[in-house]
Amino acid sequence: KAGVTQTPRYLIKTRGQQVTLSCSPISGHRSVSWYQQTPGQGLQFLFEYFSETQRNKGNFPGRFSGRQFSNSRSEMNVSTLELGDSALYLCASSRDYTNTEAFFGQGTRLTVV
Amino acid sequence: QQQVKQSPQSLIVQKGGIPIINCAYENTAFDYFPWYQQFPGKGPALLIAIRPDVSEKKEGRFTISFNKSAKQFSLHIMDSQPGDSATYFCAASIDYGGSQGNLIFGKGTKLSVKP
């Protein structure tokens, strides 16, 4: 069974640009969550999607947004990139929103210059 | 109240030793406590998890001890090996009446097991 797939693995963007990251959950999993990982702040929750609806949102500015498609694949978008957005962005999938086991992908390493 | 405090920040043990990583929380609504292991360049991998109705859970060489009254839980790694060298994260989440909340993570512990 394939794991959580995130693309691309690495990205370099310039301040002010926007970026879109993609996540394909484990087959049969319908809940997708996104986390930002930085050395200073650790792992912080961005948002969660289930059945194409955002169920929960963390404390991040509106520049961070996401969506989920009918096949459960998810994308997150960051607009007007800032240097501080440089981080590892991780996607986790669960069977559904009642399920506790969350499985992470390898992440997308975003560098903003 | 939503924080999970993890200690120590880093830990060095000899092969065969038993590293212990501790986490503490304030919010008594937390009801699910997983531990994740992360190797460089990889995403966190679920290692073991516990709920407040049990005080201990073992899976292979990994054991979680849970103290509900103290609001603390810890990870013990028996007979540690160099391959266990990684960063370990504790986490917690709330069950909102059947709807599981997001994971709140500790800051992580970098474990190094010397041969």
Image (cartoon, rainbow, N blue to C red):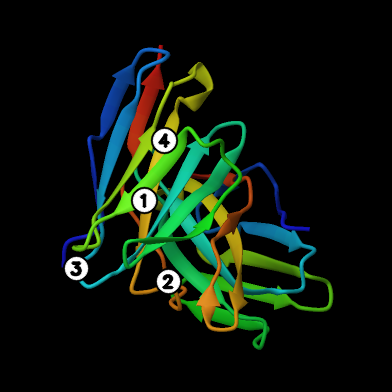
Q: Please report whichever mark, 1 or 2, sits nearer to the chain's N-terminal start.
A: 1
According to the picture, the residue beneath numbered tag 1 turns out to be A91
Q: What residue type is labelled 1?
A: Cys
Q: In the displayed structure, does residue B106 sit left or right of residue A4?
A: right
Estimate the spatial distance between the alpha carbons at disc 2 and disc 3, rounded to whole Å.
Answer: 14 Å
Of the pair B79 and A43, the residue shown nearer to us: A43
Residue B81 at least partly seen: no
According to the picture, the residue beneath numbered tag 2 turns out to be A101
Which structural element holds mark 4? strand
Estimate the spatial distance between the alpha carbons at disc 1 and disc 2, rounded to whole Å.
Answer: 13 Å
Estimate the spatial distance between the alpha carbons at disc 3 and disc 1, rounded to whole Å.
Answer: 14 Å
**Chain letter of disc 4?**
A
Location of the N terminus of chain A by quadrant is bottom left
- Percent of width and height locating residue A28: 22, 73
Counting labels gives 4
Measuring 31% from the left and 19% from the top, which residue is drawn there?
A12
Q: Which amino acid does label 3 sit on?
A: Ser
**Chain letter of disc 2?**
A
Estimate the spatial distance between the alpha carbons at disc 2 and disc 4, rounded to whole Å.
Answer: 21 Å
Do tags 2 and 3 sit on the same chain? yes
- Percent of width and height locating residue B59: 46, 77
According to the picture, the residue beneath numbered tag 3 turns out to be A27
Q: Please report whichever mark, 3 or 4, sits nearer to the chain's N-terminal start.
A: 3
Q: Is residue A71 above or below residue A113?
A: below
- Percent of width and height locating residue B89: 55, 53
Q: In this view, does A20 lie above or below B68?
A: above
Which structural element holds mark 2? loop
Estimate the spatial distance between the alpha carbons at disc 4 and disc 1, rounded to whole Å.
Answer: 10 Å
Q: What residue type is labelled 2?
A: Glu
